[in-house]
């Protein structure tokens, strides 16, 4: 069904990260010099010594040893969360994760 005020978009974070470990969340605002406006991301994450190393994060941030999953979603003005369709927003999402961790 289509998204509306009565049927908001809300992804199932547990379906992506799993529900075996606690999921934390925070908002991260990224504003880069030269851009007209920044973006706000809702970052969900898990971190536990028993979780495996996150290979995707290690590829992007070689000095980071993160155990668990991280999920960043762009916060929208008319919608709760938005996609990361273009390269600019994807780069800003990486900056949001980097600023958080």
Image (cartoon, helix red, strand yellow):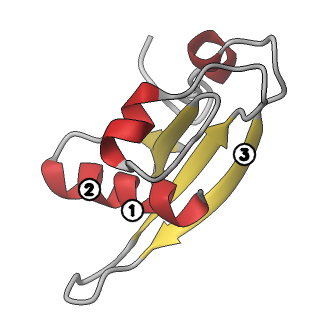
Q: Earlier in the sequence, mark 1 or mark 3?
A: 3
* Picture residue at 49% right of the left edge, 43% below the top: 72
Quarter that holds the N terminus: top left
Q: Image quarter for residue 37?
A: bottom left
The answer to whether residue 10 is above or below residue 40 is above
Estimate the x, y position of residue 53 in percent, counting from the top left.
56, 27
Tag on residue 48? Answer: none
Q: Image quarter for residue 33?
A: bottom left
Q: Image quarter for residue 68?
A: top right
Estimate the x, y position of residue 54 in percent, counting from the top left.
51, 28
Secondary structure beneath disc 1?
helix
Observer-side mark, 1 or 3, equals 1
Q: Is residue 89 left or right of residue 87?
A: right
Q: Earlier in the sequence, mark 3 or mark 2?
A: 3
Quarter that holds the C terminus: bottom right
Q: Nearer the viewer, residue 9 or 29?
A: 29
Secondary structure beneath disc 3?
strand
Q: Check disc 2 and report the residue beneath it.
A: 91
Q: Are marks 1 and 3 in contact (CB under 8 Å)?
A: no
Estimate the x, y position of residue 20 in percent, counting from the top left.
81, 11
| Measured Cα–Cα span from mark 3 to mark 2 | 20 Å
Tag on residue 95? Answer: 1
Q: Check disc 3 and report the residue beneath it.
A: 25
* Picture residue at 68% right of the left edge, 16% below the top: 14
How crowded is the residue under tag 2: few (<14 C-alpha within 10 Å), some, or many (20+)? few
| Measured Cα–Cα span from mark 1 to mark 3 | 16 Å
Q: Nearer the viewer, residue 75 or 18?
A: 18
């Amino acid at each position: 069904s289509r998204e509306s005020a009565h049927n908001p978009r809300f992804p199932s974070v547990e379906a992506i990260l799993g529900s075996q470990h606690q999921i934390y969340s925070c908002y991260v605002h990224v504003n880069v010099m030269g851009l007209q406006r920044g973006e706000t991301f809702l970052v969900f994450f898990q971190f536990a010594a028993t979780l495996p190393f996150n290979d995707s994060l290690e590829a992007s941030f070689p000095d980071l040893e993160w155990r668990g999953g991280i999920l960043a979603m762009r916060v929208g003005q008319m919608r709760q969360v938005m996609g990361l369709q273009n390269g600019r927003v994807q780069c800003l999402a990486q900056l949001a994760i980097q600023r958080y961790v």
